[in-house]
Amino acid sequence: MEDFLTPIDKTKITRFLDLQENHLGKHIAINTGDVPDLNGLDLCIVGVCEDRAVVNNEGCALGPDAIRRSLYALDKSDFPLRLLDLGNIMPGAQVSDTYEAVAQVVRELVENDVVAIVIGGSHDLTYGQYRAYASAGTVINLTVVDESIDVYKKKERLDSKSFLYDIFTESPNFLFNFSQLAYQSYFVAPRDIAILEKLNFDFYRLGQIRENMEEVEPVMRDSSAVSFDISGIRQSDAPAVQHPTPNGLFGEEACKIARYAGISDKVTSFGLYELNPKFDDRNQTVNLAAQMIWYFIEGFYSRKNEFPVKADESFLQYAVQLDAYEHELRFLKSRKSGRWWMQIPRGSNGHTEYLLVPCSYADYEGACNNEVPDRWLKAMAKLEEV
């Protein structure tokens, strides 16, 4: 990792901060020269100062250090904090070199059981985040929070509006499931939705998220990597993008989603992208981004260690028989956390095995009302493709 990382000049981050013993900045280990040993760490922050492939948001490469200044000044709370700030990945000779650097750093962290918090930089860096898993041959469930679906195919190189196309079409492909959260319909072409439908991927409009925020939790619980574009937050809460929008997530909702990602036993990397300090208003977006990371950390230290899931005595089990369906739908409810899973049947050598997929109480209620949950159908369809 040392080959890719530039140490932090701590004085530039903290010189205007009056850090006290209760602040995060007093308890975060910082790479100021030699990368510390990863043993005993839980989380690592990695900044990526890259925006050459951004579309209409030049300057977001300045985001990482701006976010650090706000993050370090937040209260530590009672976290048993074992967090290292690794410093910044600077732009490589080509943008592809930066993607490779992100992939290598995130991969090494994940393989050492350290959760990566990636601060961009432009949203196309999600491709590097994905490559961390693909390069290791690891199947990944990726979740993106954004106002648009960045699957637009261009003839030129990958960019911040097309990187999903490259992730979806890469061969060999290690993407098992993809979820798009909080997209706004007037920014999304029907063909983009059609692509996700054809691939049996999940997508939730902003209005759907707002109506029932709790439905986001099962999505995060089944995610390996999460990528959050700050553009998905409305202008009044996060103005620091070149072309903000009046609609979008509220700041509180963004923090709640970040906490859901943190509390997921399965999430091993969380990326926050596109924050452009040039357009901020009195550090409002920078402060919100720092608070989102704080909530991710708080969520991480609230994990229940329920993954991988085993159908044992720590779960209540429910069976629902639908009138027009041959399979009995089986649900599990954790006695520890109250969270729900579905058992998805799959055949193997003449025997029935089960894949456990996170779901919500609403899915169980729907099954009791003779409705097959959409999550169940999509999971079955994906298993048939494997």
Image: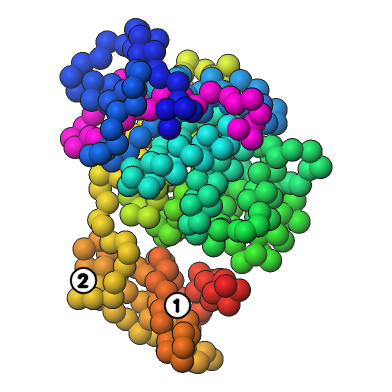
In space, the residues marked 2 and 1 are separated at their CA atoms by 19 Å
Q: Give the residue at the far right of this rendering.
A: 155
Find the magenta span and give its range.
71-97
Above or below: residue 39 compared with residue 384:
above
On the rendered structure, is 108 left or right of 305? right
SS at mark 1 in the image: strand
What residue sits 66% from the left and 44% below the top? Answer: 163
On the rendered structure, is 265 left or right of 370? left
State the quadrant of the N terminus.
top left
Looking at the rendering, which quadrant does residue 171 occupy?
A: bottom right
Above or below: residue 176 compared with residue 225:
below
Looking at the rendering, which quadrant does residue 368 occupy?
A: bottom left
The residue beneath circle 2 is: 314
Colour scheme: rainbow
- What amino acid is labelled 2 in the image? Ser
The residue beneath circle 1 is: 344
Can the viewer see residue 368? Answer: no
On the rendered structure, is 339 left or right of 218? left
- The x and y percentages for residue 372 are 51, 79
- The x and y percentages for residue 28 are 27, 26
Q: Along the line of sight, which residue is nearer the eye, 380 or 352?
A: 352
